[in-house]
Image (cartoon, rainbow, N blue to C red):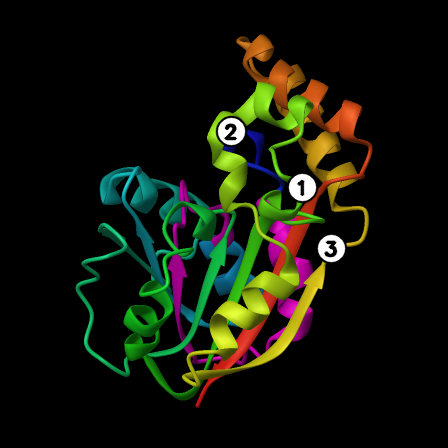
């Protein structure tokens, strides 16, 4: 798992998010922003679904190797694609999940309307994304310890209620859950510490460790949001 690291504790996030989804064997699921493939392997193994693992930063050849080693290459298809030009047919997925990726592309007002076209009617959408417990706009500034570590990126770390409104106002989906992960910062910190110990360039993780330690759960957690297409 540590060798596949590209961000905070992906399987802990997915396992928690999946409590609010209804994933069943045989479903076709798009894993959007799948990285090196850990979440796609988990979906195939734990839920018996057919997965399309879509990512822009990781090539399909690299991901296929992971799936083959995990024994799920018959259930997971790797696709390299940018999230605004998805090469899929309309109404072709029973569910779309995105773990620690949606903050990079999904905050624009126009993105949900684009994405839901790929879901079948009644299809499910589930997102786990870094969150602030209060909106940066409400605070008036990114907290200093957060800005020091991630800079402007934190303006995309929205509250769970921000996501609920952003999705429901479209009338395209019905939000079925929108919640903060309880003590999500603790898992994030534990994972980052493990990654730092595992990798030779462990100082690369120091800014995030310092950020989470200083925050102590005051502002930082994860938002878990699920919905069904109307």
Position of 57 compared to 202: left or right? left
Per the rendering, the mark at residue 3 is 2
* Residue pointed to by mark 1: 139
Which residue: 46% across, 82% down? Answer: 173
At mark 2, the secondary structure is helix
At mark 1, the secondary structure is helix
Residue stretch in magenta: 10-39
* Residue pointed to by mark 3: 181
Q: For mark 3, does the 10 Å Cα neighbourhood hold few (<14), some (14 to 19), or many (20 or more) residues?
A: many
Which residue: 60% across, 75% down? Answer: 21
Label 1 or label 2, whichever lies nearer to me, is: 1
Of the residues under marks 3 and 2, which one precedes in the sequence? 2
From what the image shows, is residue 17 above or below residue 60?
below
Q: Position of residue 176 (x, y in %)?
A: 62, 80
> Which of these two is toward me, 133 or 136?
136
User: Are circles 3 and 2 on residues that touch, CB within 8 Å?
Assistant: no
Q: Any magenta on residue 36? A: yes
Which residue: 49% across, 45% down? Answer: 156
**Residue 47 visible from this viewpoint:** no
Q: Position of residue 217 (x, y in %)?
A: 80, 39
From what the image shows, is residue 47 above or below residue 211?
below
Quadrant in which the C terminus is drawn: bottom left
* Res. 161 image quadrant: bottom right
Of the residues under marks 1 and 2, which one precedes in the sequence? 2
Of the residues under marks 1 and 3, which one precedes in the sequence? 1
Label 1 or label 3, whichever lies nearer to me, is: 1
Q: Could you give the CA–CA distance between mark 1 and mark 3, rounded to whole angstroms?
A: 21 Å
Q: Any magenta on residue 12? A: yes
Q: Position of residue 44 (x, y in %)?
A: 48, 63
Q: Could you give the CA–CA distance between mark 1 and mark 2, rounded to whole angstroms?
A: 37 Å
């Amino acid at each position: 798992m540590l060798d596949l690291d590209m961000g905070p504790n992906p399987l802990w996030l997915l396992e928690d998010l999946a409590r609010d989804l209804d994933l069943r064997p045989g479903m076709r699921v798009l894993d959007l922003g799948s990285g090196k493939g850990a979440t796609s392997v988990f979906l195939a193994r734990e839920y018996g679904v057919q997965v399309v693992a879509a990512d822009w930063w990781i090539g399909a050849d690299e991901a296929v190797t992971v799936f083959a080693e995990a024994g799920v290459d018959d259930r997971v298809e790797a696709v390299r694609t940018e999230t605004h030009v998805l090469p899929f047919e309309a109404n072709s997925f029973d569910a779309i999940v995105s773990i620690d990726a949606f903050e990079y592309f999904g905050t624009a007002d126009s993105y949900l309307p684009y994405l839901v076209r790929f879901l079948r009617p009644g299809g499910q959408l589930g997102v786990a994304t870094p969150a602030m417990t209060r909106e940066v706009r409400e605070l008036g500034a990114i907290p200093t310890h957060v800005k020091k570590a991630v800079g402007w990126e934190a303006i995309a770390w929205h509250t769970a209620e921000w996501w609920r409104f952003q999705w429901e106002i479209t009338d395209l989906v019905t939000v079925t859950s929108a919640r903060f992960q309880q003590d999500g910062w603790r898992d994030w910190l534990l994972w980052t510490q493990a990654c730092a110990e595992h990798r030779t360039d462990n100082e690369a993780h120091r800014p995030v460790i310092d950020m989470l330690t200083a925050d102590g759960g005051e502002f930082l957690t994860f938002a878990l949001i699920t919905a069904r297409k109307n």
